[in-house]
Structures are given as structure tokens and as C-alpha cells.
Amino acid sequence: MENKRHQTIWIARRRVMLLGFICALSVCAPGQRAVKADEPQAASKDDSILKYWPIDAPKRHWDVGDAQGGTEAANATLSITNESLEQGKVVLWFSNPERHIAGATNGEEYRYCYAMGRSWVFLDEYLSGTGPGQWTPRPVSSSRILLTVDGEKPVDLIADGTYAGCGSVGQPYLMSNDAIQQYRLQIWGYLTKNPKYKWYWDATVSKPAVITNNCFHPSQTVRAMKVQEAWWSNFAAINGNENNGGWTMGSAGNLGADGMPDGMQVKDGRTVWHAEGQIPYYETGSPDGRTVRKCINRMPVSGQ
């Protein structure tokens, strides 16, 4: 009887030892497996946005004219020049014929940022003036940012850390989207130094696709990202009355209790195509993207 008891204990001990050996080979280590499952996975860095936006690009100049204007330079209605600042920052300078005669130019400063597994171009400030030393900077901030990818549930980019990861300044403008079909950005923003001036920007960005520019002779085919957008603001210079907000790009859209758009029932105001080769505003067109109204008729010229 005693021998049988010892034999039972010995068998039990062998089972424990065998189990311990198997677990040491990580077959039954639930604690370790849980830790590995919880470890953050490094996101693949998609920098495709840099194909379309002139971050750290040589200085170039291009004109955007009426789509029916052919190759006549006189038909240019908007001139654009990119100017790189410190690494990862660029200003786009805009001048139309009226501003050019008056010696005035408007600019927008953009910055590259990588945060929360995504590559972004951020709009940091507006500039206006007549030349070096005469620029008036107007930095911008965001109070609310929503991102909707491929029709999924909107993500709050302030709550999820993206905005903080990009310095908590400026506003998201575009992100790399070679890996997704479409995303929508909704931005509620304001002038940092004068918060009473506010705006709402709504943009739906489609995955880059091949488009044809018939303003070139012969026509030119390139890849471009399509941006369909609407914009509301209470800027006095645009709307004539700083107390009355208005849609200056797009129309309709519900207004919330604060007098600003609530992001519902928004109608786009135009479509913009930013082309591969780092050419923003390669073409612009109707809100539905079916008609091209303005386009470049010459490739950007370096050094101007």
C-alpha cells in the first residue's frame, strides 16, 4: 500500500516536471504571449504624400489658367511658386494678375509630419504682404479634427494623439493615401493670434489615379490625388461682415449652436488635383470632379 502511494506521488511529480519543461519552450506561457500581443506594432511608413507636395523640393514656378486658354501664358489666372524653408517646410506663394500689378502676394506655409503611423502635410500659417520683411504671418490652430477613412467611423485626431504628435499647431491638410481608397478630413480652425476669426474646412481625398491634362499639346497623363472640398469662414475680408459666417467654397451645410458648421449636409465647392512630380493645383474643376476649369499648360520652371 505504501509503495503504491509513493508510485502515485512519483508519477505526479514527473507530470509537473514535464509540464514545466513544455512551458519553458513557450508552448503554455500565457503571460509571455499576452505581453507580445500587447506590444505596439511598427507601422510601415508611407511617404507617398511627398510625391505630390513640394516638401524640400527645388524652387519652381508654374501658372494655372483657364482650361480653354490653350498654351497662351497671358491666360494664366494664378501663378504659384514653391519656396523651401528649413527641412520639412515649404511656402507656396500665390499671385494673380491683379496682385502682381500691386506687388502683393499671398502665401501658405506647410510642414511635413509623421505621427501615429501616418505621414501628413500640415498647414501652419497664412502669409500676406509685398516682399521680404513685409510679410504678415497668420498662424492657424485647430479646435476639432475628424478623420474618416474608407467610410469607417470618424477618428478624433486630437483625442488620439495625432495633433499633439505634430506639435499641436496648424491643421492637417493632406496625408499619404496610396494604401486607402478615400478619406475625409473635417477641420474646425481659427487664427491663433486672433481666435474670433474661425473657419471650417471639409475635404474628401481620393487615392491617386491617372488623369489627363488637355491644356498641354499634346495632352499629358499623370497620376494625381483628387481633393473635393468646401470651406466656410467668418473672415471679414471675404464675407464683408465678420459677424456673419458664410460658405465661400461650397454651399449649404448645417450650422451648430455656435454658429459654425456642424459637419452635416456639406456640399463641396470645387475639386483640386495635386499631381505627381510635386505639383499642387495641377488642375481645378467642378465640385463633382467631372469638369476641369483650370489647369497648368507648362511644367514647372526651376529657379524662378
Image (tube, rainbow, N blue to C red):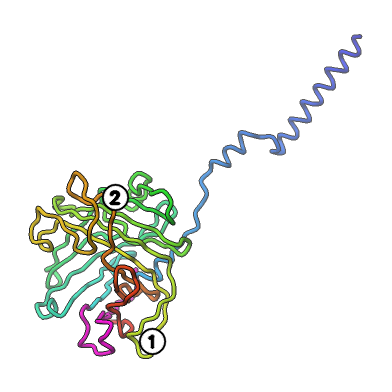
Q: Which residues are magenta?
A: 54-78
| Residue at (38% x, 86% y) in the render | 219
- Where residue 266 appears, as percent x and y from the top left, is 28, 57
Marks 2/1: CA–CA distance: 43 Å
The three-letter code of the residue at mark 2 reads: Ser
**Residue closer to the observer: 281 or 212:** 212
Quarter-of-image position of residue 94: bottom left
Q: Is residue 224 left or right of residue 86?
A: right
**Residue closer to the observer: 274 or 114:** 274
Q: Is residue 189 left or right of residue 196?
A: right
The crowding category of the residue bearing disc 2, from other C-alpha atoms within 10 Å (few below 14, some 14 to 19, many at least 20), is some
- The residue beneath circle 2 is 168
The circle on residue 219 is 1
The three-letter code of the residue at mark 1 reads: Ser
| Residue at (31% x, 69% y) in the render | 271
In the displayed structure, would residue 2 be above or below residue 289?
A: above
In the displayed structure, would residue 53 be above or below residue 160?
A: below
The circle on residue 15 is none
In the displayed structure, would residue 8 be above or below residue 207?
A: above
